[in-house]
Amino acid sequence: MLKVLLLFVPILFTNCFFPHVYHDQERVLVHGIDITSTLEIARAELEEGGFDASLTVWAIRDQKVTVEDADNVSELYFEFIDKVAAENNRTTADFGVWHLAWAISNLYRNGDAEIKARLERAYIDALKRPENLTQFKDVAAEHVNGNKVYMGDIHDIARSYACSHIVAPGNKKYLQSLDQYKKSRDKKP
């Protein structure tokens, strides 16, 4: 747990704190994003569990989604939020809950009336999650419940993760297909 924090904290601060934070959705939209394929990746990551399990959903939190996408995100949230919260490692659990609740919060707050209706149950649940954290409580509360909507990849590590987990055919910064993700995953030892 401490090793993970000791690894990430210095890296974050050497990147001039958080160079990729925005409050304008237009600045963070991924052109050509395939939300459906990206949500398949999100499911695979959540099923696997671990420190970064919730980050694919988090990586798409600022994108414009369809009603069907919102339904799928809500389904993923309720299927996995308690599994994420029950991770044996407290840092992993709290980090995952923070990022999954943050994702729901941003998708809801950036959505139109239809999207909000589809995400409302998940949003109400997500709003309560930060108060149960033992770590990251204050920052999670700000990201989930704060007056500002914090958007963007935040720091370079998150940007790298997003580029390797978001499918956006034709956008060379991101995966070109779900198969590309599956092939890179198959290469993992």
Image (spheres, grey):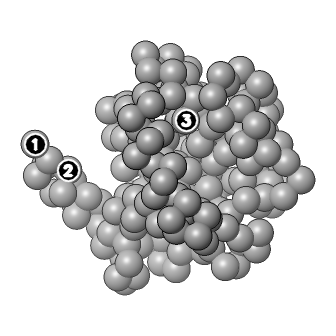
Residue 183 in picture, x, y percent from top left: 16, 57
Residue 157 in picture, x, y percent from top left: 44, 60
Q: Are marks 2 and 1 in contact (CB under 8 Å)?
A: no
Give the image quarter of residue 19.
Answer: bottom right
* Amino acid residing under circle 2: Arg
Q: Residues within 10 Å of mark 2 (few under 14, many from 20)?
A: few
According to the image, label 2 marks what residue? 185
The answer to whether 40 is drawn above or below residue 87 in the figure is below
Give the image quarter of residue 95.
Answer: top right
Q: CA distance from mark 2 to mark 1?
A: 9 Å
Number of marks in the rendered image? 3
According to the image, label 3 marks what residue? 95
What number is the disc on residue 31? Answer: none
User: Under tag 3, what secondary structure?
Assistant: helix
* Side (left or right) of 56 relative to 115: left
The residue sitting at 67% across, 45% down in the picture is 102
The residue sitting at 67% across, 79% down in the picture is 27
Q: CA distance from mark 3 to mark 2?
A: 23 Å
Q: Quadrant of the N terminus?
A: top left
* Amino acid residing under circle 1: Pro
Q: Are marks 3 and 1 in contact (CB under 8 Å)?
A: no
What number is the disc on residue 189? Answer: 1
Question: Which comes before the other along the chain, label 3 or label 2?
Answer: 3
